[in-house]
Amino acid sequence: MLLRLRRAAPSRQIDSILALAKDLGYRPRFLDAQREILELEPEKGTDGKPDHRSRFEDCAGVAQVLDAGEARERHERAPGQPDTVVAVGDARFGGGEISLIAGPCAVEDGSRLLEIAKAVQAAGALLLRGGAFKPRTSPYSFQGHGEAALDMLARARAETGLGIVTEVLDPRDVARVAEVADMLQVGARSMTNTPLLAEVGASGRPVLLKRGFSATVREFLLAAEFVLARGNSRVVLCERGVRGFDKTTRNLLDVGAIAHLKRATHLPVIVDPSHAAGRSELVRPLARAGLAAGADGLVVEVHTEPSEARSDAAQAVSAETFAAIAKDAVAIAALDRRRLRTPQGSATTS
Ligand code: PEP
Ligand code: MN
């Protein structure tokens, strides 16, 4: 591992870094006369542990970890390491496979849910997403039907065979939600809820982790690390836009972060163009942009009667628009020899 120390670090800070290094089984050695660049060579038999990087980052005298060496965090992609492919029902994310998740923002009633499920399945979705527990900004907005919605989701799965994705807000609900969900969504507002991250990690269910709206890429990856550290490697990252200064779009889709994440981590990355756009007419172009930047899938809010949606109606797209997005996905996937998996079979343009 290679550390850059603060230029004016007092000697007691440097001493404590050296003591920690020895404690963790490293041989420390300064590489420069100014004693700013510190190399930590693992003692024989010391295998770098993923938490060592954070231990050094926490030290007051450390300015930057320049190279984590073998002490790689679990989310990090080692040189040449292939994608982790996360399987959820028939969907696959990563390794050149793209899958689509779609459904209403909130589960409204059983028959409407089933109608939407069938429509998105016909258009190419492999997973149905609908909120039972909704994280709303106002306590007076519709909060979702909770437990009753879980039953509706279970029925939609039984009828269509689609895997279910739904959000869990409270660590105490994880076991109950995991009985129905094939994939647990942790929403943007919950990204820093570490007890929740630990609990979904312990559940062993695949996790759809959304980026907090003011989270840096590093904070996003460390949120994933909380799940991975619990022994659950089935994490799919979701870029859904961050808060910008301009309200023209609801959020600012961070396309650069998608391209970066595909390199920095072996975990799959998908895009939610709906919450980034906030307006239905912008969802398709943002979906295209996300896939072109390398995303392994999409999660799109779709409604058979968009104007009647009980939450996020302005950004809900019709089943027809979703079908057009799925077609785009086939074409964009083919640009770099990837393929879209669909209920109708893997789709390629060639
Ligand atoms: C949602 O997926 O409906 C949602 C509330 O998204 P986010 O957590 O990204 O705001
Ligand atoms: Mn929504």
Image (cartoon, grey):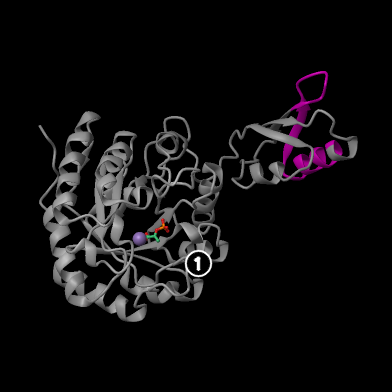
Residue at the image position 21 percent from the left and 41 percent from the top: 329
Q: Is residue 274 left or right of residue 258?
A: left
Q: Name the spot of residue 105 as percent of width and height, x first.
A: 31, 63
Name which quarter of the figure residue 337 lies in. Answer: top left
Task: Provide the residue span drawn in magenta.
Answer: 14-37
Question: Is residue 191 or residue 181 the one in the foreground?
Answer: 191
Q: Which quadrant contains ligand 2?
A: bottom left
Q: Categorize mark 1 by other alpha carbons within 10 Å: few (<14), some (14-19), many (20+).
A: some
Q: Name the spot of residue 50 as percent of width and height, x first.
A: 59, 45
Q: Please state, as top left, top right, bottom left or bottom right, where the C terminus lies in the image.
A: top left
**Disc 1: which residue:** 199
Residue at the image position 35 percent from the left and 72 percent from the top: 132
Q: Is residue 228 visible?
A: yes
Question: Is residue 275 or residue 68 the one in the foreground?
Answer: 275
Label 1 element class:
helix
**Label 1 sits on what residue type?**
Glu
Residue at the image position 72 percent from the left and 45 percent from the top: 58
Residue at the image position 47 percent from the left and 46 percent from the top: 242
Disc 1 CB within 8 Å of nearest ligand 1 atom: no
Q: Is residue 223 above or below residue 178?
A: above
Q: Is residue 258 left or right of residue 46?
A: left
136 inside magenta stretch:
no
Question: Is residue 108 or residue 338 the one in the foreground?
Answer: 108
Question: Is residue 275 or residue 73 the one in the foreground?
Answer: 275
Q: Is residue 62 left or right of residue 329?
A: right
Q: Is residue 225 above or below residue 119?
A: above
20 inside magenta stretch:
yes
Q: Name the spot of residue 122 as percent of width and height, x first.
A: 11, 56
Residue furthest out toward the top? 33
